Image (spheres, rainbow, N blue to C red):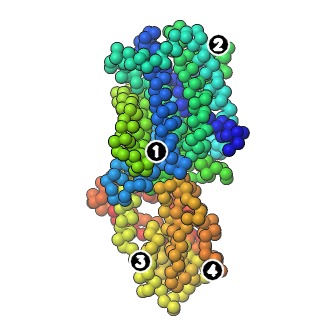
Amino acid sequence: MTNKSGSALALAALGIVYGDIGTSPLYAFEQVFSAGVHSVPVSQESVLGVLSLFFWSLMLIVTLKYVFFIMRADNEGEGGIMALMALALNKVRDHSPYRVWISILGLMGAAFFYGDGVITPAISVLSAVEGLELISPKLKDMVIPISIAILCLLFWSQRKGTAKIGLFFGPIMLVWFVVIGLLGLWSIIQQPIVLLAINPLYAIEFVSRHDLLSFFALGSVVLCLTGAEALYADMGHFGPHPIRIMWIRLVFPALLLNYFGQGALLLTQPSALSNLFYLMAPGVLQTPMIVLATLATVIASQAVISGVFSMTRQAIQLGFMPRVQILQTSAHEIGQIYLPFVNYVLAVVVVGLILIFQTSNALGSAYGIAVTGTMLITDFLAISVAIKVWNWPRWRAVSGAMLFVVIDTLFFSANALKFIDGGWMPILLSILMLTVMSSWNRGRSLVEKQIHSEAVSLSDFLANKVTDETPRAEGTAIYLAADWQKAPIALRRTFHHFGVIHKQVAILGVSYELSPYIKEESRVTIIHCDKGFLRMQVKCGFMEKVSLPEILKLHWPESMKSDLNPVSYFGYRLVITQEGKRGMHPWRKQLFRFMYRNAQHPSEAFNVPVADSMSVSIRVTI
């Protein structure tokens, strides 16, 4: 990699990866001292103690844990909760109890990530627009309408993709970090005593003196870590090196300067607590800062929305979510996708959150649980990877992660105390998502079990049903099958009704592996059978978009291409009925049926031409 290309990649990483954690100064430090009855009183001792907690939280959790440790746990270059879960599962036997626990942790982490994904756009944009109150108190009533308008425009623009606007993300965030760093530095010069907070003794003394109040304060301190998971989740787009470089050289110093600058301003001017971030800037610069902050929060929101899209696609392809329409918004970047249904749901929930909570301070109470829940689960999954993938001794993996587990547990526990004040929202969202993912996965297992019990081997079907006298239609038939070694129900039904079989018949199974990408040379396995039949298995990574016509065109055997056209695709559509409580509770069966009826058909997901495909209805009882 040349220096020029490395710099461009680092700048792009700055725009995509650091938007969330980079806009935390808008609300994080202020939240500690304005959290209602649990607010920390303003004094030199408390300001230095809180700043010390901020410094060491960023140092230990972001720098040490994520940047230098967790980012080593890449799944062929990809990161994030689902990729981490897949990496751990890849080394565990199919029927091992250990596999169940890893899956549960992964699903819980994904559920918390969805909670983070809806709160981040709301709190980020709302906190930026609240700066309008500094221009004129009369604009206070416009904060919510303007925030909703900005977010609606953001969600509307998703269909157009982020390729073009993404070119501006890096430079804008570069300006953002330079500006917030300089503002913080100017305040520090006025009150340099805040630099003493680098000493961890101030954090220890603060916690020991304030007891329960310091525990509540941790629930707000954790807001400085929002977006830390993005460093790991977006690793596949840029690689670890550019992300580490930008954190160490720019983002970390800029954040520290700004937080310490806010602390310095609070010591000098306690009345500035009403809007610490914007009041660091001279009056003439406050309006430009509001514009810049709004742009930065839109970028932060965009990064989280894109992360939710990617997470959903991974969950679909790993079998934990029903298929929904996925549109590729870039011909060059596979990671740039748009999910219309998910985008619509996100927009509705985000706008609903703003209408319910009204202010960024109120949303801050709801924010921490989702963030800390994801971080804590990442700890346990990382321990599993260290043991199963890196072959670390169990004692070494557990003891090495224990510091992070203790810290993240404290953060999570502190935020759990905010349940009534708003913490119920991410918990509710996480429970809903966990229910959806587990019900879909369990329902799929029950359906596949029944279909498998009625399956007929392809060799028996060929021996007993297909003879030399069997009429053969021109062209090739592709039968999509859950098990490529069996005669699909669609094949048996069409033969039963029409008594005709195509000259060439391929039984094609698509399997998603626990790897993000599959090498082209190992993508397709073909086994030739008698009487013009062949079995094909197409392997796909959970980050890949599948187009069966393109794959077949590339991998179809040369000796059989003469009869390749016309090509007809046959699939099946299940008609699901339920019976009793066997296998799954009736209400979860109803949920699964609802999701299946509204899920995208496999032929659409695999980009099969509608004019060349047919579906057979099959009744299944679960």
Residue 559's disc is 4
* Mark closest to the chain's N terminus, 2 or 4: 2
Which marked residue is nearer to the observer: mark 2 or mark 4? 4
Please, which residue is most extreme toward the right here?
A: 4
Examine the image and state in which quarter residue 129 appears. Answer: top right
Would you say 280 lies left or right of 398 here?
right
Please give the name of the residue rendered at 53% of the width and 12% of the height, measured from the top-left corner: 264
* Chain-order first, disc 4 or disc 3: 3
Q: Quadrant of the N terminus?
A: top right
Residue 16 percent coordinates (x, y): 60, 38
- CA distance separating discs 2 and 4: 77 Å
- The residue shown at (38%, 69%) is 451
Amino acid type at mark 2: Gly
| Residue to which mark 2 is pinned | 283
Tags 4 and 3 touching, CB below 8 Å:
no
Q: Name the spot of residue 249 as percent of width and height, x first.
A: 61, 29
Q: Which residue is mark 3?
A: 457
Can you identify the residue that label 1 sits on? 81
**Of circles 2 and 3, which is in front?**
3
Work out how far the residue at label 1 is from the one at label 4, CA to CA, in angstroms: 44 Å
Q: Are marks 1 and 4 in contact (CB under 8 Å)?
A: no
Mark with earlier residue (2, 3): 2
Q: Earlier in the sequence, mark 3 or mark 1?
A: 1
Q: For the residues carrying marks 4 and 3, which lies nearer the camera in this image?
A: 4
Which quadrant does the C terminus fall into?
bottom left
